[in-house]
Image (tube, rainbow, N blue to C red):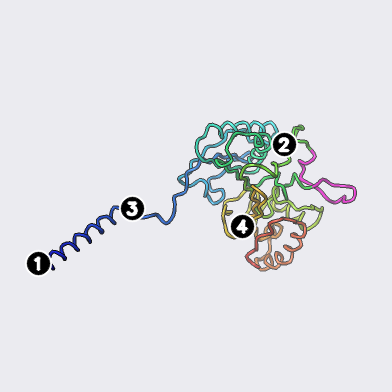
């Protein structure tokens, strides 16, 4: 009898333990990403495609809201876009991501310049992502120094000669380097507007490649490098990254291969590979990027 009672008691304890364990929810190995509202700023003339940056920011659970600014290139439109962005930053609850390309990136530059230093928007609630920014601190075409008598061959983006509010001019000096906000600035290699050679010497391989990049990209890309960021990932492990305080500068992977100046040639692929191998080091001589360059597939 004692043995039987003891067995029943042990069985009862075992059942209680098993039942108790069944009430405990398993801990998920991966936390679900927090939903954010993505405020998009289109480039000049065109909408911002939903496959931008591999579509990562457009995927659920995020929601997308277009900032309805006039994206015709003009200083007044950039200013107004920054005003509209400020309204949405105040009226949108929860985490926010601002994504803008080209002129849309310039709207963010303008907000960070004019509103950012004194804004009551909590930096912990918003992230700014700029792609193809002509006002890029390091290689944006509007930031490349103007020609000097000592360097008569050096040239710059055609808009650099206009002040920000001058007729026909809409470029600014970027955003403050010491901004309180988390900012990610992304360029594709050889983007005509945001990855400009510096110095840009007339007739150099880098100058010729930049001109070509305004028409074609790498292998099979029959449009300007600046117009397609669909293959660039925000957190690709092969991205080249430089961080300064709250700002992350990214030269995205994959590398632009072939060189645009090689892509545009009607020659066999074997010759293109050989020419890229020969010309790429010459082109890169005119780049002083702090984050380095992505490795082309032929290397």
Horizontal and vertical percent position of residue 245: 66, 49
Earlier in the chain: of badge 3 and badge 2, it is 3
Residue 170 lies in what quarter of the image?
top right
Earlier in the chain: of badge 2 and badge 4, it is 2
Which one is closest to the eye, mark 3 or mark 2?
3
* Magenta extent: 145-161
Which one is closest to the eye, mark 3 or mark 4?
3
Q: Residue at x 74, y 47 (%)?
A: 141
**Residue of label 4:** 239
Instruction: Please tell me which residue lies in front, 236 or 223.
Output: 236
Q: Secondary structure at mark 3?
A: loop
Which quadrant holds the C terminus? bottom right
**Residue of label 2:** 170
**Residue of label 1:** 1
Which one is closest to the eye, mark 1 or mark 3?
1
Earlier in the chain: of badge 3 and badge 4, it is 3
Q: Main secondary structure of the magenta part?
A: loop
Residues under labels 2 and 4: Cα distance?
30 Å
Residues under labels 4 and 1: Cα distance?
74 Å
Question: Vertical placement of 158 versus 115: above or below?
Answer: below
Q: Counting other residues with Cα less than 10 Å from the Cα at mark 3, is it few (<14), some (14-19), or many (20 or more)? A: few
Q: Which mark is residue 25?
A: 3
């Amino acid at each position: 009898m004692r043995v039987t009672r003891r067995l029943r008691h042990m069985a009862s304890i075992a059942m209680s333990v098993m039942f108790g364990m069944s009430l405990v929810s398993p801990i998920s190995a991966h936390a679900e990403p927090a939903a954010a509202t993505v405020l998009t700023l289109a480039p000049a003339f065109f909408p911002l495609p939903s496959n931008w940056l591999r579509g990562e920011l457009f995927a659920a659970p995020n929601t997308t809201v277009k900032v309805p600014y006039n994206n015709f290139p003009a200083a007044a439109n950039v200013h107004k876009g920054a005003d509209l962005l400020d309204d949405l930053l105040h009226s949108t609850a929860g985490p926010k991501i601002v994504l803008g390309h080209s002129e849309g990136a310039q709207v963010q530059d303008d907000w960070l310049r004019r509103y950012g230093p004194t804004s009551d928007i909590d930096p912990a609630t918003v992230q700014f992502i700029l792609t193809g920014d002509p006002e890029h601190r390091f290689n944006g075409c509007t930031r490349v120094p103007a020609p000097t008598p000592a360097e008569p061959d050096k040239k710059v983006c055609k808009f650099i000669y206009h002040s920000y509010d001058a007729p026909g001019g809409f470029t600014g000096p970027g955003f403050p380097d010491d901004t309180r906000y988390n900012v990610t600035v992304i360029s594709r290699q050889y983007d005509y507007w945001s990855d400009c050679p510096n110095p840009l010497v007339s007739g150099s391989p880098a100058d010729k490649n930049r001109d070509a990049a305004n028409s074609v990209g790498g292998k099979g890309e029959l449009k300007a490098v600046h117009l397609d960021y669909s293959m660039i990932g925000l957190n690709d492990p092969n991205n080249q990254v430089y961080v300064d305080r709250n700002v992350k500068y990214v030269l995205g992977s994959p590398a632009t291969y072939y060189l645009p100046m090689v892509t545009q040639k009607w020659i066999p692929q074997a010759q293109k590979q050989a020419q890229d191998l020969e010309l790429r080091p010459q082109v890169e001589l005119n780049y002083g990027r702090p984050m380095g360059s992505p490795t082309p597939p032929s290397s």
